[in-house]
Image (spheres, rainbow, N blue to C red):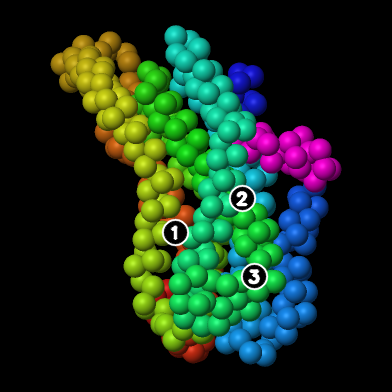
Amino acid sequence: MKQAENFSLVLGGPLYQLWRRTSLAGDALQLLPRRIIATVLLTWPPLLLLAVAEGTAWGGRVELPFLHDVELHVRMLIALPLLIVAEPAVHARMRLLVGQFLDRGLIPDAARPRFDAIIASAMRLRNSVAAELLIALVCIVGVAVVWRAQAGFAVTGWYGVSDGVRMQPSLAGWWMLCVSLPVFQFLLLRWLFRVFIWVRFLWQVSRLELSVMPLHPDRCGGLGFLAEMPLAFLTLLVALGALLAGMIADRIFFAGASLTDFQVEIVGMVAVMLFVLLAPLLAFAPRLAVAQRVGLLEYGTLAQRYARQFDRKWLRAGAPADEPLIGSADIQSLADLGNSFEVVKRMRPLPFDLASVLPLAGAMLLPVAPLLLTMFSLEEVLIRLMKVVL
């Protein structure tokens, strides 16, 4: 049980150790406000001060002043804190959910060593120094090379100007290139790496010989708690939605775009994240299908035996003459057996349903929803919502 109790996607790795040594986090990721304030102070105020010094904070010679850059402010003041807030949320929820594999007896004794080895492997990957160094390298190369060649859109911004080939950063732009964007991209990619660890963990667990119980009332053989696992990432999904919303907002306000121009991006990001978080649960579907087939055979045989005895006793004059039919436990037992068989018959082939998917999609779309006001007035939006609800 100890391995499962110690499971955590976030309590490990070089950055976690750095936060602890700089008193920005406790052993269980306490001091959340301190981490948020320290990270935001490192990434956003210097940009404002440099933009003020260069005269690009609220106007001047640029088409996109610093204070008008919606994408930047959403990225640094909303999405960045949310990436930090997501860590303790995921930690608290995942520890309880992973423990359910053992609490519900889903891991048989023969598979316990393998289950512990899977957890240990996930923790080694989470703690990998090489992995976080690689993430940092990707961020540096991506920001320094790709951003300067392809960043922004066809306007002169507070961060610099384009000479037609490459971006020539201003002083504020250099801080964004060297500090703000790498910090944000590192935290984002580090989260995506954590999601990869989680997907890998679930896939490996799904390969074990799980003791699935067809009669379990969750209609998923006892695996119904798996539907709660993607919900642990709701804060991360809101952060990704905010990042997308900020990018779209800048294009609408300063490049003449329309919200409808980004239908593919919006639908695509929602679909990709839903697939990433829910696809690992599909790996449990074969196990559930087998459990249902076996359960139907076994409980069908049991029901047949009981039904024959009931028929023989009460319909073929097999019951004692002095045994009353009214109030007989035999009838209630027959009904209970029928209910049990119905539970097995209605087992879901997937350990999640639509009710599990909607909150995930809603979390990503929530930050994009205010952009509807660029197409409709608030009154029109409310009227359309009322029509949908009523």
- The disc at residue 173 is 3
Q: Is residue 182 left or right of residue 361?
A: right
Mark 3: amino acid: Gly
Mark 2: amino acid: Leu
Q: Give the magenta part as a residue range.
A: 9-30
Badge 3: how crowded within 10 Å, few (<14), some, or many (20+)? many
Which quadrant of the rendered structure holds the N terminus? top right
27 drawn magenta: yes
Above or below: residue 242 compared with residue 140: below
36 drawn magenta: no
Asked whether 71 or 218 is in front, the reply is 71
Label 2 secondary element: helix
Q: Tell me the distance, in whole angstroms, between the alpha carbons under discs 2 and 3.
A: 20 Å
Q: Nearer the viewer, mark 2 or mark 1?
A: 2
Q: Earlier in the sequence, mark 2 or mark 3?
A: 3
Name the residue: 56% across, 36% down. Answer: 131
- The disc at residue 361 is 1
Location of mark 2 (residue): 187
Q: Tell me the distance, in whole angstroms, between the alpha carbons under discs 3 and 1.
A: 34 Å
